[in-house]
Amino acid sequence: MNTIFEFLFGQYTGYNTIDVVLEIIAVLCGFASVWFSKQNNILVFPIGIVSTIIFVYLLLKWGLLGDMMINAYYFIMSIYGWYIWTRRNDTQQITPVTITTISEKKIGIAIFFAALLFVFVVYNTFNKWTGWVAYVDTFTTAIFFVGMWLMAKRKLENWIFWIIGDVISVPLYFYKGFTFTSFQYLGFTFIAISGYLAWRKNLNNSPVTA
């Protein structure tokens, strides 16, 4: 038992207690936020904002710039998504769950490559190309950038990007030494799969499908 505990949580030796507590709070808020997203509930954004603010602080402190930029972007897109999800025309909500259009797919591709370029420039500027993790960081950052934009637009395909990014992030964060965050992404993977199925059902039951 001690060996298993040491394997899972030995990375936290030397961490400040407050940082560990903050990570746990951010993880719990992250779980709640993704759950509310699955439920198509507006609370996804305010709770998600709490999680992203904490992670921006922690990741900046730990020098993980790619991950920090993901969360800073989440913060901005959460405010945008909060606004989009609450826009109404009289009593008719004008941002139902829909599938991406051709033009939105083109924008998504542009966001993906723009994110790759942006992270590449940042890592070069701060000399962060220290190993293979940096390259994976760059890729997952681009995936999550597109996923968050699609979620803010209430597009079904956002869940596909979350699933891909979450699956990659589970071993990545464990390797980095953040066990709680690794567990978070493991939970996110299952919620994202469930979220895709729930949103697809919502889409099929909606009179607006495009």
Image (spheres, helix red, strand yellow):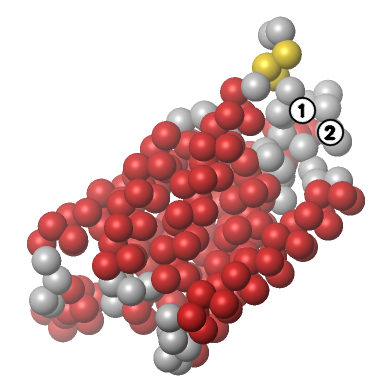
Residue farthest to the top? 90
Farthest-out residue, right: 102
Which mark identifies residue 101? none
Give the distance between the C-alpha atoms of the residues marked 2 and 1, in whole angstroms: 9 Å
Q: Nearer the viewer, residue 12 or 86?
A: 86
Residues at circles 2 and 1 in contact by the CB criterion of under 8 Å: no
Binning the other alpha carbons within 10 Å of mark 2 as few (below 14), some (14 to 19) or many (20 upward) gives: few
List x then y, in percent, for residue 189. Answer: 51, 59
Residue 159 can be seen, yes or no: no
Quadrant housing residue 119: bottom right
Tell me where residue 202 appears, x and y as whole percent: 70, 32
Amino acid beneath label 2: Thr
Quadrant where the image shows the N terminus: bottom left
Q: Secondary structure at mark 2?
A: loop
Residue type (three-letter) at the residue carrying disc 1: Asn
Q: Is residue 136 left or right of residue 94?
A: left
How crowded is the residue under tag 1: few (<14 C-alpha within 10 Å), some, or many (20+)? few
Residue at position x 47%, y 70% in the image: 66
Rendered view: 47 above or below 171 = above
Q: Is residue 206 above or below residue 123?
A: above
Residue located beneath label 1 in the image:
205
Q: Which mark is residue 209?
A: 2
